[in-house]
Amino acid sequence: MRAAFSVEPATIPKALSPDKLFRRADLSGLVFATTRELPPAPMLAGQQRAEEAIRLATGLAARGFNIFATGRAGARISSSLRKMLETAQPSRTPPQDWVYVNNFAVPHRPAAIGLPGGRAVPLQQAMRKLIEDLRVTLPALFESDDYQRRRTAIDEALRANTQKVFEALGEKAASRGLAIIRTPMGFTIAAMDKGEIVDPEAFGKWPEERRKVTQEAVASIEREMEEGLRAIPKLEKRRRDEVNALDQETARYAINQEIDDLRDGFADLPRVLDHIEAVRNDVLQHVQLFLGQPEGGSATRLDAMPPGHPFERYDVNVLVGSDTEGRSPVVEELNPTLGNLLGRVEHMSYQGALVTNFRMIKAGSLHRANGGTIIIDARSLFSEPYAWSALKRVLVRQEIVIEDLAHIVGLMSTATLEPSPVPLNVKVILVGEHQMYYLLAALDPEFQKHFKILADFEDEFERSPENEALLAQVISGLADEAGLHALDRSGVEAVIEHAARLAQDSAKLSLLVEDMQDLVTEADQCARTAGRDAIARADVEQALRGQRRRASRLEERSREMILRDVSQIATEGSQVGQINGLSVLSLAGHAFGRPTRISARVGPGSGKIVDIEREVELGGPIHSKGVLILSGFIAGRYALDAPMSLQASLVFEQSYGGVEGDSASVAELCALLSALAGLPLRQDLAVTGSVDQHGHVQAIGGVNEKVEGFFDICAARGLTGRHGVLIPASNVQHLMLRHDVVNACKDGKFAVFAVRTVDEVIALLTGHAAGTRGKDGRYADGSVNAAVERRLMRFAAARRAMTDARKARKR
Amino acid sequence: MTSKTSTSYRRAVLGMATGSVDRHVLRGAVEFARLLQLEVLGVFIEDQSLIDLAALPFTRELRLPGHEWRMLEPQRVDDELRAAARQAALLFQREVESQGLACRFEVCRGNPAALASNLMQASDVLILAEPAAFDLLAPGSESAQQAAEAAAAAVLLLPRSGMPRHGPVAVVSADPSDACFELAARIAAAMGEEALAIPPVEPASSVTLMESLQRALGPRHERLLVLRRDPAMPREMPLEVASRRKAPVLVLAS
């Protein structure tokens, strides 16, 4: 018979060996001195799943096979995608150039013309040269004697005709004693006598008959004058028509010669030829535009025309001119506003009005990406009004229609353009977080119609020697791209080990290159300060210490509160119903662990465990769930033949913020069992882990920070060799502890225990075996379980007695 | 009479009646006045006989540009004459005064012929524009031209449009001692052009003169033609030449 409350050594877990606390990088398979000697990493290293998805989608021309790439922010998805796609060989139709030209028939609907890549700018140049040539050729032609002779003949003919009509009229009026007189507003007819206008007085003295004859003559001449004047506009119109015909005839020869030369360069492009024909007709109809050259000095060039200038109509607006040497364009839109995506029609203030024309149509990123791929940050897209719905419309219509936000929201009523749509041939890649993808899939019924391919980027990958070597190449690329020193072997190992720490898993490596880039950049600075040519482990570790130091103000304040006994955390001795739990605080990317005193009080009652955190609404639902599981554990393990008659309360002492998660449920259970059994718990140990109803300890998160958080308090107070932390056995694989913690363990000053059951935990904390039921169904005397069950039975008996007494009183 | 002797011109007189001048003509006048450093006198004559005529009950007016007939009412005619005078003054101010030339603008009411006759002096250059189409129906510049001739003043005839910006100053005279050579040379120097003598034509007509100019100038156009009034010259010849050659013609007193 063993002594009461003795511990059976086999039930007590041993401290983990130092090699379990930290896994060093193994680059033995990689021969190099510095990263300069390493080959570049393959594109999308460690992202096979995402890479397969992207290759599938980019190879498919079918509608809707756009990509939603998900992953965490630090994975640099967009830049990785861009690099991968930029280096990819073209697999689809080569990208086209696009231009907007004036639609001479419907000027407010400029025409979009697609050309083979590289032909837009030559077209623009050729058109500008045509106009500049015509502006020299045509005036010279129209100043020639031949033209002037014919033009003068037309003008003279009009003048002669007019003169003939008017002279005849004047003579007729004179013959009847009248004259036609100019008034401020027109003409009148006056009776004349001896070359003078007859005034009313003299007229009144005329005989009646003469007055009558004169009035009849005036009426007659009035009619003829009216007819004569009406003929003038017709004569003038005839003159204009004749001049126009002469101008066209004169201009046609020069224009045809120039335009035929232009056509030769674009004979393979029917739409361009159509436009050139439209230009030919328009120039012929508006020859006069070319004749009003400013005196002295050259005329304004076509590319520098102010808005509203008549020659603008002949210009070519190059919307997209390819410069990708035949490769599919890859465009990353960082600011996906409606205008930046679809393009916009700009306006210019001109003489107090907002004016525009086809030259002020600006390409959007979808135009620039046409024939290739556009990468858009989903969060930015959704924060821009109308951008998402506009993108979906574009994908439905398969053409880019420029939409004006100001018109959509009714802010502007200025007349604008309706440019003809540009056919869309773009692979769209949205980049966003996982949650955004799932939300879109759940809430937007059209989403999966347009984004059929999910490219799911991993945050981490398996930590194998091969993958460590792969990550070494990635790290090499990061340093190289940023122009940093190369890393030596030790430096690379330190970064890889940090990648495992970032993954919170000694068997995984983080793929969040952004964090690694930051670390390497800071380590480079440390190396330069130290005068080293290559970044070494010491530099990386110094950079890590610096990162921690910069973010540790709150961590230090928290630790200081404990060390000054403001926050009461005991790290020696034993206490009944009191235990050190561990929690993790994560603020702005910096996470640190801190111990929390958890206490339990028990008494007879109705079988309820009061979670004080929950009662005051400081506990979250997962924490409450953990506490309720404790009831299940106690009810299932103890007092099987009697109702639970326990009233217990659990509290996180000096906790004034919210408590969430169930990682303290093992600690809470131990505090409860200690209170029930009356057995003190060691205060030099801290516990983390969740527990199920059968007493199995389950994994928790933030194990490294939790161990280090308790270690820092103990180390500050002085390590005794009895300090340690109990962690779930399933979390051992996640351990990537700081070197000082590992060294303390190595020296036997600190310990980390891996536990699988609550029985192991309670044995470690009390020094007593948990105990198992014997054949008689009772726990062995001296065991923790026996003490707990006895106490619970006492509570049950007390409750029964109270119930019986109440019943007796009622009777 | 100054007959072929040098005249010192001091004033450019510009009749500003409705329809007689426009911005183009005014600019031509300003350029000429600047070359010879002349004072510009703008004159608007309100024809009193027109107001009197309006008193006749049957007198109607065909109003432009709508071609509508309205009774001619004295008060309205008076108002419209004053408004036209204000408008002419405004145009004169904008196109002449703003150029920094010595200038004056006068509004007179009375008989146009009598007023013109009183106004014109031998040292004046009367500036007349080629009549617009409607002016052919009721030429209003004849009395002014007659007054200028009577006063031995010079007349500058300006085409309505297309005045050349470059070209020689052509002068027509058979007499080498004619002062018009000196005047033409002075103008040409001020313009930065050459002066070119053109022999007189027989018979004097616009056709023969233009052929002579064509022969002398070839593809060029004169920037100004200077000639002296001659009894043998058809009265309409200078205006026809100005109109067809699209170049000003300065007619000096005989």
Image: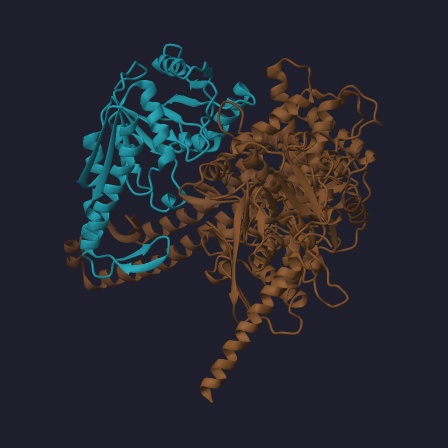
Q: Residue at x 50, y 30 (%)?
A: B207
Specify the colour of chain A.
Answer: brown
| Position of residue A275 measured from the top left corner of the image (x, y, whole percent) | 68, 44
- A672 shown above or below A517: below
| Position of residue A291 measured from the top left corner of the image (x, y, whole percent) | 54, 34
Count every numbered label the image shows and give the total: 0
| Position of residue A90 measured from the top left corner of the image (x, y, whole percent) | 81, 40
Q: Residue at x 32, y 55 (%)?
A: B63
Specify the colour of chain B.
Answer: cyan
Q: Residue at x 44, y 29 (%)?
A: B163
Of residues A82 and A308, the one drawn nearer to the viewer in this rendering: A82
In the image, is B248 to the left or to the right of A392?
Answer: left
- A178 shown above or below B34: below
Of residues A273 and A212, the one drawn nearer to the viewer in this rendering: A273
| Position of residue A672 measured from the top left corner of the image (x, y, whole percent) | 57, 58
In the image, is A16 to the left or to the right of A305?
Answer: right
For this orientation, the residue located farthest to the top is B177
For this orientation, the residue located farthest to the bottom is A811
Say whether residue A668 is visible. yes
In the image, is B241 to the left or to the right of A6?
Answer: left
Q: Residue at x 46, y 43 (%)?
A: A567
Say whether residue A143 is visible. no
